[in-house]
Image (cartoon, rainbow, N blue to C red):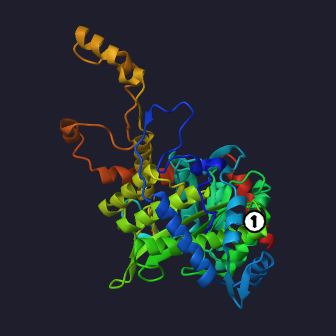
Amino acid sequence: MSRFRGRADRGGHGAQEAGAQAVQPSAQDIARPRLSLLNAEQRVAIHEASLSILARSGLRVDSERARDVCRKGGARVDGDRVFFHLEQVDAALESAPATIEIFDRLGKPAFRLGDGETRFGAGVTNLWFQDPITDELTPFSRADMGRSVRLCQALPNYDVISTLGVIRDLPPEVADLYAVLEMVANSVKPLVILISDESLFPSALELLDAVRGDLGERPFVIPYLNPVTPLVINEGTSDKLLDSAARSIPVIYSNYGMSGMTAPLPCAGALALLNAELLAGLVLSQLAMPGAPVILGSLPMYFDMKTMIDFYDPQTHLIDLGCAEMMADYGIPHAGTSGSGDGWGPDLLAAGASWMNQVTSVMGRVGLAPFVGSVLNSKAYSPAMTVYGNEVIGAARLFARGFSVDAASIGAEEAIAQLATEGHFLTAPSTLKSYKSAYYPSIFPRIGLEKWLELGRPGAEARVRERARDLLAEAPAPADQEEILAKGEAFIARL
């Protein structure tokens, strides 16, 4: 039997009741909405199934460098197949950090992954840019990257900015480097970077060192790595994982499973397989460098064999929540789905997907939802949907915060006195103290029918589009933008 158990003694997610958001030491009187999926017995069953997959099926590991790390760490290697045993998994779970401190580009603490809160980001690697007013699609360009990153910098509910698109107006041999440069020059927020050309990954890290300094010291960049489902660790992914571990750079190791195609159709089977792949990545990282910071999670999709389209289904959100709960028991920081991809722009389809993802994330155990803003099957970046997503996240966070149920908040004495003297609560002390505590969207005014008619019957979607257009044109760049661009371009020119 496995030694699998929740690691409450290590802090972070494992220290909380399933589904809870992070609480302050004095918050026993806070009532919070919670969403829990798997019970303890079910989590053990998923874990045991994952261990069986790792020990009996193993994984194909394409990199000789990675296979050598596994072999030296005691794994059984048969050709390109690697098999991990229980003790290696347990050791990796013990050595990996339960929380990871993330900083902004200026070196200031930004947040801590694994503390029970849900963070959000915009992204990711879209091929097209969708005009916020006309919905016209154009190939994603360097200029699109710069102005879109500034838009995300201006939206307060995004904690990170992920690689928003694949730059297509520059040669492929330098496009990824300019993408990283535009991200770091146009924002001070933490970044999640995806490098399409895997051979450029070392150069991307060197570029960031050149403009910011040692990435492992106060990390503000998180590389995003994808193994290949089912059960393949491709060479590019393993090499990036090993390079990052050697420098103590935190990474997101996330798999992409299509239920019914690359993963089992039943939710439990998909979760067990994807969990096995994540554990394999964790073991590899810890064999290479014990204590290496790793964030684990899955992007579970549903595959439609008729249309050949993969999409987020309500059941895939269940798998995401299950994965988050597994990571909570492991004491490993989590990154999950973002509700992007559905919709043809900032429309009802995209809005519904965003609401479902963000509300379930903050009510569950999701640690990071890094890719808000993609539409058209995750091929087009929508600035308008990014703007709307900022509002969804703000409302979801307020909902997840719950409310106080202490004696002062219940206010029985105040209610009795107020009703006896005034007959209403307009001037009650609690009203005067908290009358601005409701959620007020930054782009949608709270107006009634008469005012709406007076304003010419404005549409909510038009407000979103106009706000995105204005931010793309007017969102300011950091004060050191030109300095960073000059340093980065000089570095790229020397390659």
What is the x, y in percent for residue 454?
A: 21, 38
What is the x, y in percent for residue 60?
A: 64, 85
In the depicted structure, whether residue 142 falls above or below residue 452:
below
Q: Residues within 10 Å of mark 1 (few under 14, many from 20)?
A: many
Is any part of residue 167 visible from this angle? no
In the depicted structure, whether residue 255 falls above or below residue 97:
below
What is the x, y in percent for residue 131?
A: 42, 63
Q: How many marks?
A: 1
Residue named by callout 1? 245
- Looking at the image, residue 156 sits to the left or right of residue 418; the answer is right
- Of residues 152 and 110, the one nearer the viewer is 110
Tell me what residue is drawn at x 66 percent, y 49 percent: 10
- Of residues 402 and 468, the one nearer the viewer is 402
In the depicted structure, whether residue 125 falls above or below residue 324:
below
The amino acid at mark 1 is Ala
Tell me what residue is drawn at x 40 percent, y 60 percent: 132
